[in-house]
Image (spheres, rainbow, N blue to C red):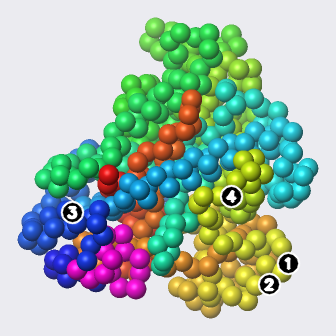
Amino acid sequence: MKLANYDPGHFYDELFHAPGSPRPEAIPLVDRINSLSLEEIQHRQQAAQIALFKMGVTFNVYRDNQGTEKIFPFDILPRTIAASEWQVLEKGLKQRIYALNQFLADVYGDQKIVRDGVIPADVVYSSQGFLKQCMDLKPPKGIWSHISGVDLVRDRTGEWYILEDNLRCPSGVSYVLEGRRIMKSTLPLVFNRMQIQPVEEYPSHLLETLLNLAPDYIDNPTVVLLTPGIYNSAYFEHSYLAQQMGVELVEGRDLVVSDGYLQMRTTKGLKRVDVIYRRIDDEFIDPLAFRPDSLLGVPGLMEVYRSGRLGLANALGTGVADDKVIYAYVPQMIRYYLGEDAILSNVPTYLCWERSQLDHVLANLDQLVVKSASESGGYGMLIGTQSTQAEREAFAAKIKAAPRNYIAQPTLSLSRVPALMGDEFEGCHVDLRPYILYGEDIYVTPGGLTRVALKKGSLVVNSSQGGGYKDTWVVS
């Protein structure tokens, strides 16, 4: 089956206006795919997947009894975005990340936004991500979330919405970088013909962002990437980014607090560490400050961090900004801190802790998507249109028992991109996760991770739930 015969249906399609009518930025790509035989396309798809497997591009699944390591499925038909459209997205993402950082500084400081009644105090204090231990914390340069991933979706009309903020330990950028490398050899002719904005600069921008956190008096800072270890779902990414930046990949057992500084054990003795890119959740990073049973962190790290002798990306306590109830208030944050309207809209959201909204959610569970405020990865979620009566009743009981822990949103008709499934191209639903770095200024990687639901009709794009990914081409 050729792309020329592909029918985008009633959804917004990222490559096609209508059957046989590609969007202007996608024309060279569609023409090239149509010039290849099905056998050649399948061969290139298989070669790309084999190459990624050989490079170890995998992820680990905790809730799977078939083994921990899995291949992240990759589809060779990229998603295209016009540069003019990307400029709007980039501006909106910078605005959002700046406002969220202002919120974090405020909520752990003077709490003006709470005292002025913009966000209810109970909503903030009841968030699982709000850490009292971080009150009055002063991160280097006043920046809290240096590395962010914001999930975007389009609806049936083509309008963009922010679906979720990830300001703790966002993952997936290694797949963006490796997917791009593979695409350059999979479709070299069309890649060289189209003016595609590069993503390869991300590791150098990331290192610059981390070096910006080091105390000013240090001439040659030591940066490390702290991983929970090989069984973590994103361990490939941890080792990959450390290698790309040329920094040490360490576990908690490799570090110790000594003489008031964080030190790294080496064959030549202890070496001071100045900046950590952490891929460990807050509660595990220091057993003296948080969970005493944690074996992943470093005792005393929090005290060194508070003293200003250590830079940490991202800052501890950023999880409060990931809370899906707090998410509903981001447009108000933007108006409060910046005096502007949000450039990118939230998905309309019902807060179950408000009685009138709770009643509406319970009465319309078959039409809504309900999410746990603190879970991720596609877990703790009910898609009403694809649920059974028994599932809805069970979820209703959970919501009634803990209404603060749930939000609900309308079921969006997510945009689609053709994906190779067997012998034909099927329209599959996608989202987009751009990566934002906040150092001396805010940098947004052009494109990002396009996650794709590779089960026909599915709306769940998470890798842990059967999703795959595509390269994202911002076309100048």
Q: Is 283 displayed left or right of 244 in the figure?
A: right
Q: Distance between the residues labelled 1 and 2?
A: 6 Å
Query: Mark 3 or mark 4, which has the lower sequence index?
Result: 3
Give the image location of residue 187, x and y in percent: 17, 55
Asked whether residue 129 is in view, the answer is: no
Q: What residue type is labelled 1?
A: Arg
The image quarter in which residue 263 lies = top right
> What crowding class fits label 4: few (fewer than 14 Cα within 10 Å), some (14-19), or many (20 or more)?
some
Question: Magenta region's main secondary structure?
Answer: loop
Q: What stretch is highlighted in magenta?
A: 8-20
Marks 3, 4: nearer the viewer: 4
Q: Badges 1 and 3: C-beta atoms under 8 Å apart?
A: no
> What crowding class fits label 2: few (fewer than 14 Cα within 10 Å), some (14-19), or many (20 or more)?
few
Q: Which amino acid does label 2 sit on?
A: Asp
Give the image location of residue 278, x and y in percent: 56, 35
Marks 3, 2: nearer the viewer: 3
Q: Distance between the residues labelled 3 and 2?
A: 48 Å
**In front here: 133 or 25?**
25
The secondary structure type at the circle numbered 2 is helix
Q: Distance between the residues labelled 4 and 1?
A: 27 Å
- 314 in relation to 367, above or below: above
